[in-house]
Image (tube, helix red, strand yellow):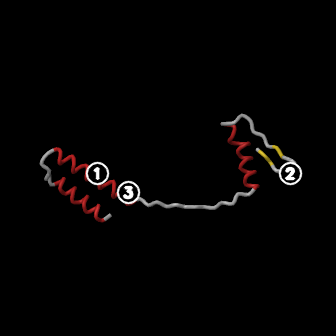
Amino acid sequence: MEDIMQILTQMEEIRKASAVQNWQQETALDEVIRHCRKLAEAEKKTVISINVNVVVTDEDIDDIMCTALEGGINFSCRTGTVSQNAVGMRSY
């Protein structure tokens, strides 16, 4: 990152000193400065990956489904039913 910052500083000094001779050089210099700034910003970013294991119990699923059926599902679903099979398991 120090190399990029050093190059960026040098290019900005050249730009301020009006050392360019024509508009093509000025445009090229502006592109280099813009590119160096993007590289510097990209190196400042930090990527963090988090893996979380969550244990979901039957009661958690029941609570989630109850909340969905009683509160939020009516926006996208006209009807919802809960039935219990012979083993005592609920199906939604």
Q: Is residue 33 above or below residue 50?
A: above
Which residue is situated farthest in the top direction here?
78
What x and y, as percent, mark residue 4?
Answer: 29, 61
Please state which of the two labelled residues, at mark 3 or mark 2, is closer to the viewer. 2
Q: Residue at x 52, y 60 (%)?
A: 49
Label 1: how many Cα within 10 Å (few below 14, some 14–19, many 20+): few
Quarter of the picture holding the N terminus:
bottom left
Q: Which sits earlier in the primary sequence, circle 1 or circle 2?
A: 1
Which residue is situated farthest in the right direction here?
86
Disc sitting over residue 24 in the figure: none
- Amino acid at dot 2: Val
- Amino acid at dot 3: Ala
Going by the image, does 91 lie left or right of 55? right
Quarter of the picture holding the C terminus:
top right
Task: Give the Cα separation between the discs numbered 1 and 2.
Answer: 66 Å
Tell whether label 2 touches label 3 (CB within 8 Å): no
What x and y, as percent, mark residue 81?
Answer: 78, 40
Q: Secondary structure at mark 3?
A: helix
Q: Secondary structure at mark 1?
A: helix
Observer-nearest of 21 and 73: 21
Tell whether label 2 touches label 1 (CB within 8 Å): no
Disc sitting over residue 34 in the figure: 1
- Amino acid at dot 1: Arg
Disc sitting over residue 42 in the figure: 3
What x and y, as percent, mark residue 64?
Answer: 71, 49
Q: Which sits earlier in the primary sequence, circle 3 or circle 1?
A: 1
Task: Give the Cα separation between the discs numbered 3 and 1.
Answer: 12 Å
Name the residue carrying label 2: 87
Please state which of the two labelled residues, at mark 1 or mark 2, is closer to the viewer. 2
Q: Secondary structure at mark 2?
A: loop
Task: Give the Cα separation between the discs numbered 3 and 2.
Answer: 56 Å
